[in-house]
Image (cartoon, coloured by chain):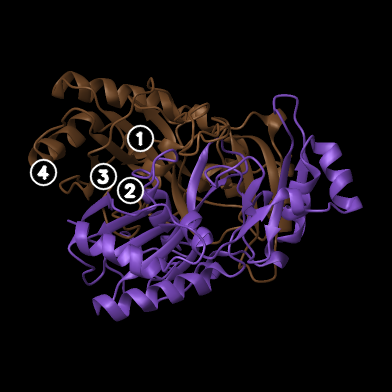
Chain colours: A purple, B brown
Amino acid sequence: MTAVSIFSIPGVPDITSGDDLARILGDAIHSHAGGIAQNDILVVAQKVVSKAEGLFVDLDEVAPSAEAKELADQLGKDARYVEVVLRQSSRVVKHFWHPSQKEGTLICEHVSGHISANAGVDRSNVGGENRVLLLPRDPDACARRLHQSLQARFACAFGLVISDTFGRPWRLGQVNVAIGAAGLPALRTEIGNLDAHGRELSVTEPAFGDEIAAASGLVIGKASRTPLVMIRGLQWHEKPGCAGDLLRNQSEDMFK
Amino acid sequence: MTAVSIFSIPGVPDITSGDDLARILGDAIHSHAGGIAQNDILVVAQKVVSKAEGLFVDLDEVAPSAEAKELADQLGKDARYVEVVLRQSSRVVKHFWHPSQKEGTLICEHVSGHISANAGVDRSNVGGENRVLLLPRDPDACARRLHQSLQARFACAFGLVISDTFGRPWRLGQVNVAIGAAGLPALRTEIGNLDAHGRELSVTEPAFGDEIAAASGLVIGKASRTPLVMIRGLQWHEKPGCAGDLLRNQSEDMFK
């Protein structure tokens, strides 16, 4: 019987550009979770990672391109915001404006490969109407750095996920997904295992990083300041990977 | 600080057609979780629900239509299997065969509205190469019935989710999602709440049912017989809903 415990770790102050995030998170973990133990998994909200890296853009300083202006016009969006989104994107996957929406939806592939609304460029909880916050261009590298610093301090093998909140095709509501990961397999493999009847389980690959991120959403309130979650009690046998492992190759993309 | 505990409940035997699932699950909960307490959430794997309802089909007894034969040919699939999938579907959303795949992918909208590969028709863990297992046609109704029976026995307010394992567009690997729900809100609403900076959080609607299902995936091994998971320590203020609340209206479907 596997028993898993999930709790948010308090004590993380407002993060600003240049903060030593590993030290700040490490202090909160030390004070409120008794440190990191073998096989613990930390989930860190993307927002604090981006804030520590100073990935703010002031929309007043953005000159929108003709492309951004046209798209903004079609979607009822701020052209400066659309410009920032396009600069973070390798492609626009889909855009549409449904009568039920206050403004249109712009789905983009972020340069890291993750596909979401507005390439993850965030207007909430970043301080000021005209200020937006970008995703890290390489969130797996951020996860690795954070993991390395925390490992140096707590000296044990653990997992770390950087999560963001995504909408989904076909389903309403949002779930948290892994955009960065280190120290754990983002994708687990039950391929080739036999099921209880001896039949080969040919396609079972649990998206472990996304399961972890979604579970952390149960204890992270959007409106609260709880960017750090601990998940205890899990084990894995696969090699550590990265959140990039969760990305579908574009040639296999069923929706292009 | 919210602390949530997730564990699988042992003691559920192999389920067969006609079994009294509520009694069997209730016995396991009584023996291994000390009953159901206020705000507990039970996650039940779709497979045992379908098995108890006897939703097996023997492929040897299926005569494929011309449409099924043609689609099966295009996708390298068993025409009898495709026929069963089509009978469970309100529409074929997408089908394709990528060179990397052993056989093609058939994405369908199940009559319940949930969109997944093969309309959820399952060939693994159902006993025998030619036997397949269908999704319940109305999984929310199954969730309500199960919830009602367990509520009569344990006399408290709790949540129940019936989960299935789905692939996703754009992302590799599978996560568990809610296809049935009772006693809890499948979709939570933070719409209109203010964020920590006083800015309105206009689009935050956590897909609570799917978060719950994904979290349960952390303790359900596909190859193991653990169809029942308990999640303890969560609270909610919204009215109970159903998994149908998680379905995007087709007119808002960005991928049709």
Viewer-closest of A94 and B197: B197
Is residue B254 shown to the viewer in this render?
Answer: yes
- Separation of marks 3 and 4 at Cα, in angstroms: 11 Å
Element type at mark 1: strand
Mark closer to the chain start, 1 or 4? 4
Mark closer to the chain start, 3 or 2? 2
Residue that mark 3 sits on: B229
**Badge 1: few (under 14), some or many (20 or more) residues near its Cα, within 10 Å?**
many
Q: Are marks 4 and 2 in contact (CB under 8 Å)?
A: no
- Separation of marks 1 and 4 at Cα, in angstroms: 19 Å
- Separation of marks 3 and 2 at Cα, in angstroms: 6 Å
Mark number, residue B161: 1
Indicate the quadrant where residue B115 lies: top right
**Badge 4: few (under 14), some or many (20 or more) residues near its Cα, within 10 Å?**
few
Q: Are marks 1 and 2 in contact (CB under 8 Å)?
A: yes
Type of the residue with mark 4: His
